[in-house]
Image (cartoon, grey):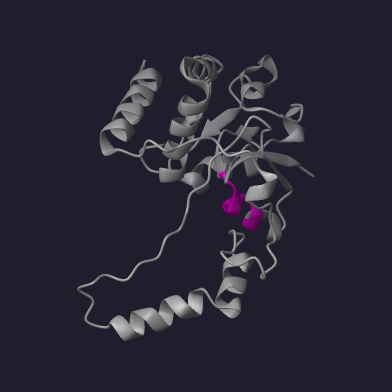
């Protein structure tokens, strides 16, 4: 069977032994000759999690992050569509790894029988919070509060865990690694202008 590794965001890496590639441990491992033309990545213009990873790597590594992206491009990394579209070629054996796969998608694929493994690089990854809010202008504030209360209840958080996400409650067991098991890259600068600049620089690099 094909065994796939996923370096993960909450961003990860997926890889296939059928292609003869070694198991990656770090993001930079995908720049090696073994992964020439065998790597995909979600399009950060279509995946907010992928864009968060670019920002996290830039904040954590500075210019070395852009040297990494340049090396990945030179090694033949392909920018795919949304997250699931980037993982599909790996599961089909056409590619060997995904740079920055959303981990809960891969965990779901594993649950469905795919031979995958999610790898979190020791140098760090990013997380994508899933906030909830009730607008002050809501015409059904009581119903909205009841829904939020249910989502945050043990029963609701169990459903969150079943979707391979991180529960907000510590008394609900997770099915995947939690924050205390991961090194989190900084994504503090969340301004629209910076996000646009990072995306523009990435698109320019991969359009060359």
Instruction: Where is residue 190? Give x, y as percent.
Output: 35, 39
Q: Quadrant of residue 138?
A: bottom left
Say if the magenta span includes residue 146: no
| Vertical arrangement, residue 180 with respect to residue 67, above or below | below
| Vertical arrangement, residue 15 with respect to residue 128, above or below | above
Range drawn in magenta:
102-108
Residue at 35% x, 79% y is: 144
| Vertical arrangement, residue 103 with respect to residue 41, above or below | below
Residue at 63% x, 24% y is: 30
| Vertical arrangement, residue 40 with respect to residue 174, above or below | above
Could one spot residue 95 in this view of the protein?
no
Task: Pick the residue in front: 171 or 70.
Answer: 171
Residue at 55% x, 78% y is: 153
77 relative position to 142: left or right: right
Q: Quadrant of residue 82?
A: top left
Residue at 30% x, 38% y is: 191
Say if the magenta span includes residue 107: yes
Instruction: Where is residue 183? Give x, y as percent.
Output: 63, 38
Instruction: Where is residue 108? Give x, y as percent.
Output: 63, 58
């Amino acid at each position: 069977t094909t065994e796939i590794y996923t370096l993960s965001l909450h961003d990860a890496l997926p890889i296939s032994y059928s292609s003869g590639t070694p198991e990656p441990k770090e993001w930079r491992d995908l720049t090696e000759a073994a992964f020439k033309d065998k790597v995909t990545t979600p399009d950060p213009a279509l995946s907010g999690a992928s864009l968060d990873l670019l920002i996290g790597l830039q904040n954590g590594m500075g210019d070395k992050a852009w040297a990494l992206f340049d090396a990945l491009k030179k090694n033949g990394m392909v920018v795919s569509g949304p997250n699931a579209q980037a993982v599909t070629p790996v599961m089909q054996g056409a590619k060997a790894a995904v740079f920055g796969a959303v981990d809960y998608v891969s965990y779901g694929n594993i649950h469905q029988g795919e031979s995958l493994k999610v790898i979190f690089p020791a140098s760090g990854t990013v997380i994508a919070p899933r906030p909830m809010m009730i607008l002050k202008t809501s015409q059904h504030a009581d119903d909205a509060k009841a829904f939020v209360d249910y989502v945050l209840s043990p029963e609701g958080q169990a459903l969150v865990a079943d979707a391979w996400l991180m529960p907000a409650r510590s008394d609900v067991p997770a099915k995947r690694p939690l924050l205390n098991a991961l090194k989190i890259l900084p994504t503090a600068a969340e301004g629209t202008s910076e996000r646009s600049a990072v995306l523009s620089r990435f698109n320019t690099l991969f359009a060359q």
